[in-house]
Image (spheres, grey):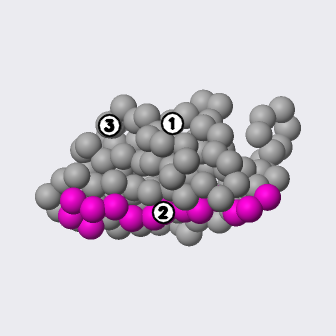
Amino acid sequence: MSRTIRPSVTLLALLLLALPAAAQHVGGRGVRGLVSSASTMVPVQGSATIYTVPQGNHFVLTQTCFSGGGMGLSGQSFGRVVTDFATCTTYVPGVALGPGEILTCDNPNGGDAHCMITGVLTR
């Protein structure tokens, strides 16, 4: 890539990442529902609730992202969601979580860390 194009591409990528998240409906052949994301800071060697599936709905988890190695995501009835301990893990077609499921991010590390999830809220 040329020296003038690389900074432009980098700037464009940063601008796209800075756009606010907005829920959007999905449909067609795949899962139908509302795309939604949640994020939270997780304290040193602690855990934090990131999402509770509303009653009467299901949540299809499609991606987890963590800023620290060894972090994880658990549901109070589902149990541990398997990740490959990469920065982000994508689940295709997704992990189905039932109504009332409480998702918690765990941080076994020595510093504050960030946890983010994305999925589709269905009825």
Residue extent of the magenta highlight? 43-56
Badge 1 marks a residue whose secondary structure is strand
Q: Residues within 10 Å of mark 1 (few under 14, many from 20)?
A: some
Q: Is residue 71 left or right of residue 39?
A: left
Tell me which residue sits at (55%, 58%) in the image: 102
Q: Which mark is residue 101?
A: none
- Disc 1 target residue: 90
- The three-letter code of the residue at mark 1 reads Thr
- The three-letter code of the residue at mark 2 reads Ile
Q: Work out which quarter of the rendered image holds the N terminus and state it.
A: top left
Badge 2 marks a residue whose secondary structure is strand
Q: Residues within 10 Å of mark 2 (few under 14, many from 20)?
A: some
Tell me which residue sits at (82%, 53%) in the image: 123
Q: Residues within 10 Å of mark 3 (few under 14, many from 20)?
A: some
Does the image show residue 58? yes
From the image, state whether disc 1 or disc 2 is nearer to you: 2
Residue 103 in the image: x percent, y percent?
A: 51, 55
Nearer-the-camera pick, 118 or 6: 118
Q: Label 3 vs label 1: CA separation? A: 11 Å
Does the image show residue 16? no
| Picture quadrant where residue 51 is located | bottom right
Residue 12 in the image: x percent, y percent?
A: 46, 56
Q: Label 2 vs label 3: CA separation? A: 18 Å
Residue 20 in the image: x percent, y percent?
A: 56, 69
Q: Residue furthest left?
A: 110
Q: Is residue 31 left or right of residue 79?
A: right
Q: Indicate whether residue 38 is drawn in magenta.
A: no
- The three-letter code of the residue at mark 3 reads Phe
Decide: is 73 above or below 56: above
- Disc 3 target residue: 85
Ranked by sequence position, the earlier of labels 3 and 1 is: 3
